[in-house]
Amino acid sequence: MTKLRISWQKKLKDSKDLPKVIVIDDKMSKRWGTGTCVIPAPLEVDEIMKKVPKSKLITINEIRQILAKKHKATIGCPITTGIFAWIAANAADELAKEGKKRITPYWRTLKTGGILNEKYPGGIEGQKKLLENEGHKVLQKGKKHLVLDFEKYLAKL
């Protein structure tokens, strides 16, 4: 029996019981401090990624800050926010392959420090090409690729 693959678009729309704000427990507090943590819904992450205009950028940390502020939490969950950005990227790629033109510009979402995300569709080369098409310069530092002066291009959302 073959298992049917769930589409990325369906994964993006499956919010389970999210968003929810949890108290940061002792185990988490060693890394994240005290207070509360919002675990966002996948569509919330996608919604923020969609707002980044052409030639502008955002990092996962900025998305986390926007989510924390929206839900009056101390922090946005670093793990789920990153996973949901990856799901949003793959859902957008799926739509592009279906011929859709208006998709989430996932390539504008970078990791901390302006680093490209190797897990996005097309890998580093795919994201690099899309960023360079919008006028960004991508440098390689060791094994990482990053956008030169990415801070200058951060979107004000």
Image (spheres, rainbow, N blue to C red):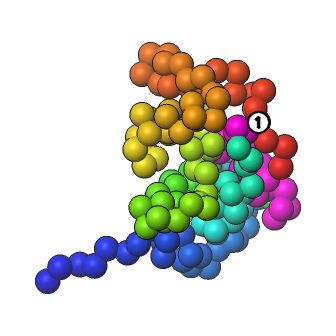
Q: Residue furthest bottom?
A: 1
Q: Residue furthest top?
A: 142
Q: Residue furthest left?
A: 1
Q: Residue at x 75, y 28 (%)?
A: 151
Q: Does 81 sit left or right of 48 as displayed?
A: left
Q: Position of residue 91 (x, y in %)?
A: 49, 63
Q: Position of residue 22 (x, y in %)?
A: 70, 65
Residue 55 in the image: above or below residue 136: below
Q: Secondary structure at mark 1?
A: loop
> Which SS type dominates the magenta stretch?
helix
Residue at the spot of label 1? 154
Magenta span of residues: 55-72
Q: Nearer the viewer, residue 72 or 52?
A: 52
Q: Nearer the viewer, residue 129 or 38?
A: 129
Q: Is residue 21 visible?
A: yes
Q: Is residue 33 visible?
A: no
Q: Residue at x 81, y 64 (%)?
A: 71
Q: Position of residue 95 (x, y in %)?
A: 49, 65
Q: Residue at x 83, y 62 (%)?
A: 70
Question: In the image, what residue type sits under mark 1?
Answer: Leu
